[in-house]
Image: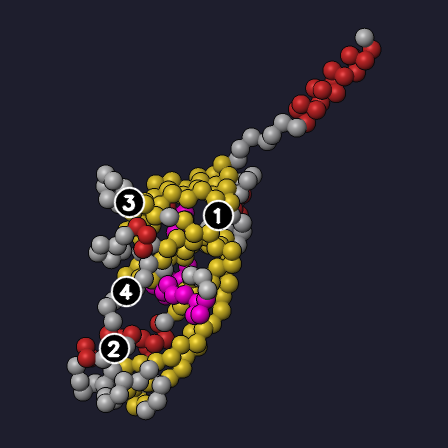
Amino acid sequence: MMRSKILLPLLFISFFGCKEIPYDISTFEQNELLKYKVDEDRFELGWFPESTTEKPLFRDYSILDKEITPDPNIDSTSIFHPSNQPIKTSLKLMTDSISLDNRKKLFSIHGKITQGHDNTKPEDFKVYIGKRKDTTVNVSYMTTPHIDNYYKGEKIERDIDFEVPAFYLIDPEEFPVVKSSDTKENLLHITTLINEKSVLVLALNNCYVEVFEIGKLIHSSKN
């Protein structure tokens, strides 16, 4: 009898001591996410050269548009270089819901991606979450023969090498985009663990990437 009186309080303490803490969920509106959008209209999707796997590398080519100009005496459309390529657009993420489980650091976002190219397929979009690592990469502008090439307003006779800002993602996780059978919209549904350094990147060839520092939502939800 004495034994049962001792075990009962111990079981009582064990049960409540191991009880899981209730969920601590924060929700966010789209305008709150936009506070953590960075590097707008700057980086473009690319790939690490000579990589055995498709490893994304996001490069800033804006310097090429500023420094390299066509021969002013001929039709600019006859020269292939960054300054006369089609104007790049930015992707746009329209969210339906954003939430963060503060205890588990479980991030969820649901919405659609707009402003892609005509006839863009869902698989053409590249969506990643990972830790950003800034770097630089070397690129070359190849002079076009039989025409005048200009760099910083001066005529050049040789190829020009550049070092441009870039970044890649450490341990990136890729997420699919699906097309709605009803609305034909490109839908994005993500639920994954994040940390304070996590960034969300939306990319498409010949578009500026969208970069969101979603890890900062963790600190925002605590305020």
- Mark 1 vs mark 2: which is more N-terminal? 2
Closer-to-camera residue (139/30):
139
Which of marks 4 and 2 precedes in the sequence?
2
Tell me, yes or no, whether the highlighted magenta stretch contains residue 161.
no
Three-letter amino acid code at the position of disc 1: Leu
* Foreground residue among 26 and 135: 135
The reply to whether dot 2 and dot 4 touch (C-beta < 8 Å) is no
The secondary structure type at the circle numbered 4 is loop
User: Residue 38 lies in magenta, yes or no?
Assistant: yes
Name the residue beneath numbered marker 2.
Answer: 80
Label 1–label 2 contact, CB within 8 A: no
**Cα distance, mark 2 to mark 4?**
15 Å
Residue 137 image point, x, y percent? 45, 73
Find the magenta span and give its range.
Answer: 32-51
At label 4, counting other C-alpha atoms closer than 10 Å, the crowd grade (few under 14, some 14-19, many 20 or more) is few
Name the kind of residue labelled 3 in the image: Lys
Q: CA distance from mark 3 to mark 1?
A: 28 Å
Residue position for label 3: 179
Q: Is residue 147 above or below residue 131?
A: below
Packing grade of label 1 (10 A; few <14, some 14-19, many >=20) is: many
